[in-house]
Amino acid sequence: MTRTGGFQDDDFWTGFYDFLFTEQRHTQAEELLDASPLLAFPAGARVLDLCCGPGVFTVPLALRGYDVTGVDLSTAMLDLARKRTADAGARVTYVRADARAYEAPGRFDVVLNMFTSFGYFEDPADNARVLRTMYTCLAPGGTLLLDLAGKELLARKVTPPKVVRRGDDLLVQTDTVLDDWARLRSDWVLVRGERVTRATLVWFVYSAVELRRLVREAGFGRVEVFGGFDGRPYDENAERLVLRAVREG
């Protein structure tokens, strides 16, 4: 049996890669960029994809003519992103950096943080530092787009263990609510033949009200919350918690 150390461990990302980053997810990113009014940026916009992973959004953004920088802490994911970028004939700047400490003051018109890539630091102050990084990296008038599974949505979906089969591989995911809904723990068990890999992720979960407050405390103004990339309201029909905010000064 192998145990990985969670989101800061490259063994986690490589071991569970086939389940985390399916071709369907790459296709979904393409479709969102084609259809979403929230992802329609001015031509030539400078875009920071913070926690970019293997380039799910960075590559198609670059192919659409944006000036894209992808930042991630995982060397393995950045290597995969670079390969995907080269294969697509795109141009992206990739930087290995901690999201709490990356510095590019005023460099970007747009900062993206996609697919629930926020809230994974154990200290809430560190998650606030990530928001401050996003604010600092934006030029005045720049836009933050933050996408995650909101607490209201998770409350509908935390169920008995979820089983996913991909070929002969089997993944069992069990979610547990912690600290009166402040955090969620997700225990993963991946069975590949005789090999069993286990991993545990713990992250903070946010309601729309909580996330809006944190974003405002980081300095942002004009904060809007949507229930999906189509711009629908964040209500009982919401599919995601998508927050859009502007650096006004």
Image: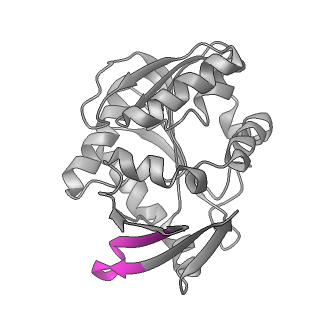
Q: Nearer the viewer, residue 237 or 50?
A: 50
Residue 160, image x and y in percent?
A: 54, 87
Q: Nearer the viewer, residue 3 or 103?
A: 3
Res. 198 visible in picture? yes
Residue 163, image x and y in percent?
A: 61, 76
At horizontal 44% and vertical 48% (from top left) the residue drawn is: 13
Quadrant placement of the C terminus: top left
In the depicted structure, whether residue 84 falls above or below residue 116: above
In the depicted structure, whether residue 206 falls above or below residue 120: below
Highlighted magenta segment, given as a residue range: 176-190
Figure coloring = one colour
Residue 80, image x and y in percent?
A: 53, 31
At horizontal 33% and vertical 58% (from top left) the residue drawn is: 4
In the depicted structure, whether residue 108 falls above or below residue 174: above
Residue 17 as seen in the image, left or right of residue 40: left
Q: Is residue 180 magenta?
A: yes
Given the current orientation, which residue lies at the most extreme front position? 194
Q: Report the number of numbered marks.
A: 0
Residue 148 as seen in the image, left or right of residue 31: left
Q: Specify the quadrant of the image occupied by residue 107.
A: top left
Quadrant placement of the N terminus: bottom left
At horizontal 72% and vertical 35% (from top left) the residue drawn is: 33
Given the current orientation, which residue lies at the most extreme bottom position? 160
Residue 47 as seen in the image, left or right of residue 13: right
Residue 87, image x and y in percent?
A: 67, 20
Q: Specify the quadrant of the image occupied by residue 235.
A: bottom right
Instruction: From the image, give the main secondary structure of the stretch colored magenta.
Output: strand
Res. 138 visible in picture? no
